[in-house]
């Protein structure tokens, strides 16, 4: 499975935007970029995913580099509830589907 | 209504015992999974079932046996529990298995402690 690299931790203040980077230099042409987050004592929660184009949903935006070797999850206005571990994951189809490889993720701390 | 529910949420048991964790999803999905999150917080897939057929079986001891009575349920049975089995086990589901864009929905987790 293609590997992703994320900073171990990031901090933000409430109401400010947060940009969470992810490097995936070995991404293949059919890999989707998924972001999940895990709040304390809960299961991972889907945030957003994309293939080539930037994506927006009610939770966040995903900016994908033109060469697809990196991406950035953007939380437009961080809240205390956004404090979690954020995982950037690549998924391939076929038999590898569902075989999500979670790395260490980025621990996001949001200050009041 | 909880989309993916698993029981029990907490389980403390002695070494050598046999225990089961049950999982049910009401999303109408045809694929279900079991993941294990160890003390270092790494999440690793253990098993995946599609329409009751085993499609992913990672290197997991034979003491772990998944059972899928129907596509809405995937239970995990663990025989002869060992200390190293202590972890959080997450059940998950998704629709389809070949489209990489499909979202995977996770349960709340089952905290297993073997003493």
Image (spheres, rainbow, N blue to C red):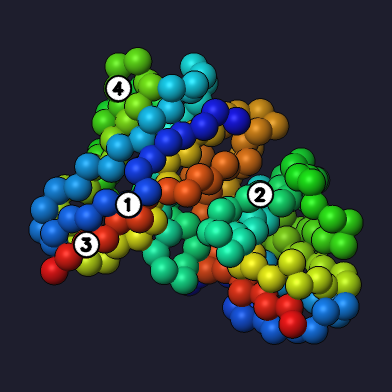
Q: CA distance from mark 3 to mark 2?
A: 30 Å
Q: Earlier in the sequence, mark 3 or mark 1?
A: 1
Q: Is residue B31 above or below residue B14?
A: above
Where in the figure is residue A72, as x and y percent of width and height? Answer: 28, 35
Q: CA distance from mark 4 to mark 3?
A: 26 Å
Q: Are marks 3 and 1 on the same chain?
A: yes
Q: CA distance from mark 1 to mark 4?
A: 22 Å
Q: CA distance from mark 3 to mark 1?
A: 11 Å
Crowd tier of the residue under label 4, counting other residues whose Cα lies within 10 Å: few below 14, some 14–19, many 20 or above:
some
Where in the figure is residue A74, as x and y percent of width and height? Answer: 23, 42
Question: In terms of image quadrants, where is residue A64?
Answer: top left
Q: Nearer the viewer, residue B75 or B82?
A: B82
Q: Is residue B93 above or below residue B63?
A: above
Q: Who's the residue at 70% across and 84% down the image?
A: B12
Instruction: Determine which residue is flagged by label 2.
Output: B45
Q: Nearer the viewer, residue B84 or B2?
A: B84
Crowd tier of the residue under label 3, counting other residues whose Cα lies within 10 Å: few below 14, some 14–19, many 20 or above:
many
Crowd tier of the residue under label 2, counting other residues whose Cα lies within 10 Å: few below 14, some 14–19, many 20 or above:
many
Any part of residue A49 in sight = no
**Marking on residue A65:** 4
Q: Who's the residue at 60% across and 78% down the image?
A: B9
Where in the figure is residue B16, as x and y percent of width and height? Answer: 88, 78
Instruction: Determine which residue is flagged by label 1.
Output: A9
**Mark 3 residue element:** strand
Q: Earlier in the sequence, mark 1 or mark 4?
A: 1
**Marking on residue B22:** none
Where in the figure is residue B30, as x and y percent of width and height? Answer: 66, 48
**Marking on residue A110:** 3
> On what subunit does the disc labeled 1 rest?
A
Q: Are marks 3 and 2 on the same chain?
A: no
């Amino acid at each position: 499975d293609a590997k992703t690299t994320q900073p171990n931790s990031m901090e933000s203040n409430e109401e400010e935007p947060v940009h969470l980077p992810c490097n995936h230099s070995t991404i293949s042409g059919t890999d989707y970029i998924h972001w999940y987050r895990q709040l304390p004592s809960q299961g991972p929660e889907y945030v957003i995913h994309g293939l080539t184009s930037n994506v927006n949903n009610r939770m966040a935006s995903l900016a994908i580099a033109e060469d697809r070797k990196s991406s950035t999850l953007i939380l437009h206005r961080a809240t205390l509830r956004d404090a979690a571990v954020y995982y950037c994951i690549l998924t391939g189809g076929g038999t590898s589907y569902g075989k999500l490889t979670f790395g260490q993720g980025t621990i996001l701390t949001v200050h009041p | 209504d909880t989309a993916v529910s698993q029981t029990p949420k907490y389980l403390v048991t002695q070494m050598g015992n046999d225990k089961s964790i049950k999982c049910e999803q009401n999303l109408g999905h045809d694929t279900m999974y079991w993941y294990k999150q160890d003390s270092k917080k790494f999440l690793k897939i253990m098993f995946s079932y599609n329409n009751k057929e085993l499609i992913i079986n990672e290197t997991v001891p034979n003491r772990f046996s998944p059972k899928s009575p129907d596509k809405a349920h995937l239970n995990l049975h663990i025989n002869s529990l060992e200390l190293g089995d202590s972890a959080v086990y997450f059940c998950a589901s998704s629709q389809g298995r070949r489209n990489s864009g499909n979202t995977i929905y996770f349960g709340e987790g089952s905290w297993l402690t073997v003493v």
